[in-house]
Image (cartoon, rainbow, N blue to C red):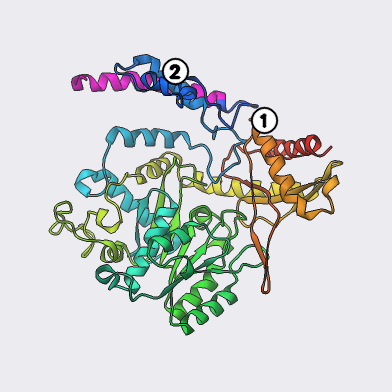
Amino acid sequence: MDSDNAAVELRELLTEAARVFSEYVQQSQQPGAHVSGRIQGVIANAAQPESDASMFPDAGVGSRVWDDVRDVCAGAANTWSSTFLYKLYAAPAPMGVVAETLLAVLNNNAHVTRAAPSGAAIERMVARKLAQLLGFPSEADGLTFPGGSYANLHALMTARNTRFPDVRTRGMSNVRGAVFTSAHAHYSIDKAAVAAGFGLDSVVHVPTDAVGRMDVHQLRVLMLESKARGVEPFFVNATMGTTVLGACDPIAEISHVCREFGAWLHVDGSWGGPHALFGNDPALSVRGVHIDSFVVNPHKLLGVPLQCSFLIVCQGLSVMRRALGLGATYLFHDEQEKCRDSADLPCDVGDATLGCGRRPDAIKFWLMWRYYGTQYFTKRVAQARSTSLRLAELVRTRTSLLGRWVLVAEPASTCVCFWFVPLSLNEQRSEWGIATRRMCSHINDAGSMLIDYASVDVFDGNNVRALPEFFRIPINSPSVSNVTLDAVLHAIESAAAELYP
């Protein structure tokens, strides 16, 4: 290793990387490109004991590593294809790839300001801009986290330690608190409750209405019942863009209930949050609504590379420092180094989290913002919304000699859910889910498309039933066109023709 030649080596590697990566992206975007990934090369032999020496050589393979890079690409899910409609993200924007590379070049740790000066400044600037777009008060601030689940955990832990401050020293022995969340909310809320010491029995899953939104009347009834049992209803999670249906809870109404009970209102906008930030639908705006914390993942709908997630806190980061900080002075030396524009918030933000090492992920979001402008995010959100509505209309109006199309619900954001019912199963609703799973696997095994299925519970009074599995198509990428939508529907019909002749 010759550190004096690091710049030369890096230039040579990045030059070749640019060629290999751009070649991969170009091939990945071709019609018919393989989407599901095919393990090949040395990776295919990784499970063989005798392959250890070749997989982990004593002497490096040098330039032959580019063959390995190509093997990794071949075995990866192809997010650059417009037919990657599998999860709640898609290919990153090219400037995002450049920004991700910059983070590796800098190798800064954003736990203390001196270890990442520009990253810390950008993180605070972006967090405050997001707070402004949400209509939060001027003291609001935020941090990045490695994913929405981790951000949700921090919101719950902050709320817990704020409402029950003795937990920090005495533990959970005398705490009786309940967490309320929609029955369709992300499982990370349940996991956060377990991690926070409440347990699953303390999580109350509030029924939803016909389109998957939290039933606010039921929320209030359940909070009253909890209060009567001597269990404090201290935390409510509302969702903007549920994982399956993409539903958006009535946040303004939920906020009123939370104010009545003095409960912390958290909004998990991991997927749907961009509609509140950059969308033009007044029904999805949260301006003027009291919210204690809000999560948004720019790595989903906005095209920032994985991972980039923000937790915005209404009362600012000082509340997180008080709730989670331990003031480890061997690491955080900023007692006399207060941020110039804040009387009570030290610059080092790592103590406001449960961890230590932190990537300055805000840089990725900010550089994309600078390069493309606000209009890029606005157009992405609007296009995703219009494309989802177009797909819903196609499902609603499409006719087929092979079966019938049934929409599960009108899309509230950018996810479209539906069944295709082969003719032979038309009256056998119990078989719809099996058929969906079979058709989905058939399509994914073919390799040129990746789609998914899901199911949710529906509520009718005291009765709860699970819907048969249905196709779930999230729209995240601007590359999804009318041609893509038609290809998806045609692939489903073709699968039905082969499986249910």
Q: Residue at x 48, y 37 (%)?
A: 92
Residue 297 highlighted magenta (yes or no): no
x and y percentages locating residue 95 in the rendered image = 43, 35
Tell me if residue 289 can be seen: no
Q: Quadrant of the C terminus?
A: top right
**277 horizontally vs 342: left or right:** right
Give how far across and how far down residue 305 sits, in percent: 44, 40
- Which is more N-terminal, label 1 or label 2? 2
In the image as oriented, which residue stretches furthest toward the front?
49
Q: Residue at x 47, y 61 (%)?
A: 190
By secondary structure, the bulk of the magenta-drawn segment is best described as: helix
- Say which element carries label 2: helix
Amino acid bearing label 1 = Ala
Locate residue 150, reporting x and y percent. Answer: 40, 54
Q: Quadrant of residue 326?
A: bottom left
Viewport quadrant of the N terminus? top left
Q: Which residue is mark 2?
A: 67
Dot 1 crowding, Cα within 10 Å, few <14, some 14–19, many 20+: few
- From this view, report whether residue 249 is shown above or below residue 31: below
Q: Which residues are magenta?
A: 1-27
Foreground residue among 255 and 222: 222
Query: Would you name the residue on which mark 1 appears?
Result: 446
